[in-house]
Image (spheres, rainbow, N blue to C red):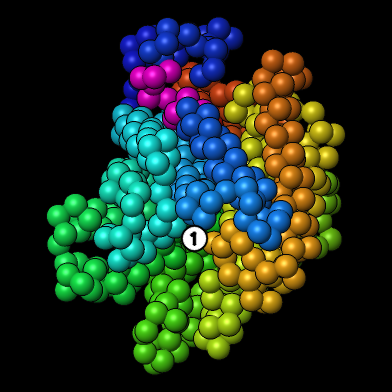
Amino acid sequence: MSSTLHTPAQHASATKGAKERDTYLTADYGWKSWLFTVDHKRIAVLYLISIMVFFLIGGTFALLMRAELMTAKGDLFEAETYNKLFTMHGVVMIFFFLIPSIPAVLGNFLVPIMIGTKDLAFPKINLLSWYIYLVGGGATLYVAITGGLDTGWTFYAPYSSTYANTNVAAAAIAVFITGFSSILTGLNFIVTIHKMRAPGMTWFRMPLFLWAQYATSLIMILGTPVLAITVMLLALERTFHIGIFDPALGGDPVLFQHLFWFYSHPAVYIMILPGMGVISEIVACFSRKRMFGYHFIAFSSLAIAIFGFVVWGHHMFVSGQSAYAGFVFSFLTMLVAIPSAVKVFNWIATLYKGQVSLETPMLYALGFIGLFTIGGVTGLFLAVMGLDRHVHDTYFVVAHFHYVMVGGMVMAFMGGMHFWWSKMFGRKYPEAMGQFAAVVIFVGFNFTFFPQFILGYMGMPRRYHQYNDEFTALNVLSSAGATILGTGFLMTIVYFLWSLKWGQKAPQNQWDAKGLEWEKAQSPPPTFNFEDGERIVVTEDAYAYTYEESHTGSGHEVKK
């Protein structure tokens, strides 16, 4: 098994004795060692910094929206400004936080270590993906600074292709560029998982986190080009007035929706599947049990990736598609809920009679299970054509989407960052603060978004900055919850940053967890992940926990 070597200076450092070896954090070869690094762990840290910047920007847009919605009269922003706020919130959070966060940060950091190799298959392409992400993000910020975007994150034609007076073409190009970052990351993960697993690391000894990353990568490779082509066609029609989507030019606006949702519904699983992999790792560790139904969870990840491509039409029940097509898409949408339910039932079965401990990562995992279940069940409501016609484009859809994305993916991302923080940086965060912030975020989230289910069922449309007076009380409650939610996230960022300097030094295996990243890699890992001369050979299945949790051996042999 081979692995791409790093720079000569890094290679020289890696050949020192184990006691003298620098970690990927402390090795210092000048500023170029970060900006031109091919170390997957450093690239993960660069992604983390970049993604958190966009998270703060997108979160600020959200808080401004909730401030506007405190009153029914729309007295804080003009309608056009409010349109730009919710559009930029959606574009930034979806394309620059939700989609890349777990694959680009936790995936980049953990995939090579979990399979027992030194780096990803294509280290330079991995660095290129980060630079592409920055270029796309910079173009999006340029759009925000020079007038914004008011089409909604869905870019619906023909408004976006012909009539909008904002920077639609620039935003489309930014999304087009950013798509290549996802494609390259997915390609890297697929090749690495296929070709670079340590001896003994069979497909069914892989951690479920890797199965989730693999399934996500398939969606990235197959779906992202469709979105890229769609937004480029949009930019071409807007620039050269080619009749593609605008009916006044001979185009078809429904064609845009078909193309857009063919990617954008699988994109939901790009966001949520990696989070499901994180939850599997956390649940097994803090239950001290083997994962119940390992094979079912693994194959359910692939099933979600496959079925996700055939359900896009449920976004178009009110767009003029035939009742027969609607029936087929409604049935398929019901069907895609099954593999997600398999995961939830198996997590709960793993918890049953386990030695459950409620450290911060586990609190986030439990929050994920509860909130994602609500999001999934309400998704079935939207799969029913009759009910969807009533709640389509209302706050019911907003609440459902955020229960899946924030209640699901963001809770999983927070759980994963707390679970692997000590492995990434070698420092512990204050556990009591972590537990308190997790509760604050859970409470704030439910106060923010549960009232929106009621608002939507009562008929309040989304994307409106004015509303009827009878909706005021629930909107005030939602805005108050957003303040609590934002406070919880801010607390987390503060104590994470505090821990980098003042946090207690972490042992190699803080949680007594199973897996190569815990049992064979230091905290933080050295440049090439494992000690000099080590060749990892895996001899046991994943999640080989016992109730007694005897520490008589890791089950991984080390050959010198």
Q: Main secondary structure of the magenta part?
A: helix
Relative to the observer, which residue lies in front, 412 or 79? 79
Residue type at numbered disc 1: Val
For residue 223, what is the image quadrant? bottom left
Q: Secondary structure at mark 1?
A: helix
Residue 36 magenta: yes
Residue 540 falls left or right of residue 502:
left
Tell me: residue 164, above or below residue 93: below
The residue that mark 1 highlights is 268
Residue 267 magenta: no
Image quarter in which the N terminus is found: top left
For residue 339, what is the image quadrant? bottom right
Q: Which residues are magenta?
A: 34-45
Q: Whole-percent x and y of residue 478?
A: 73, 57
Q: Whole-percent x and y of residue 180?
A: 31, 44
- Residue visible at 74% across and 40% down? 488
Relative to the observer, which residue lies in front, 209 or 491? 491
Q: Whole-percent x and y of residue 265?
A: 44, 65
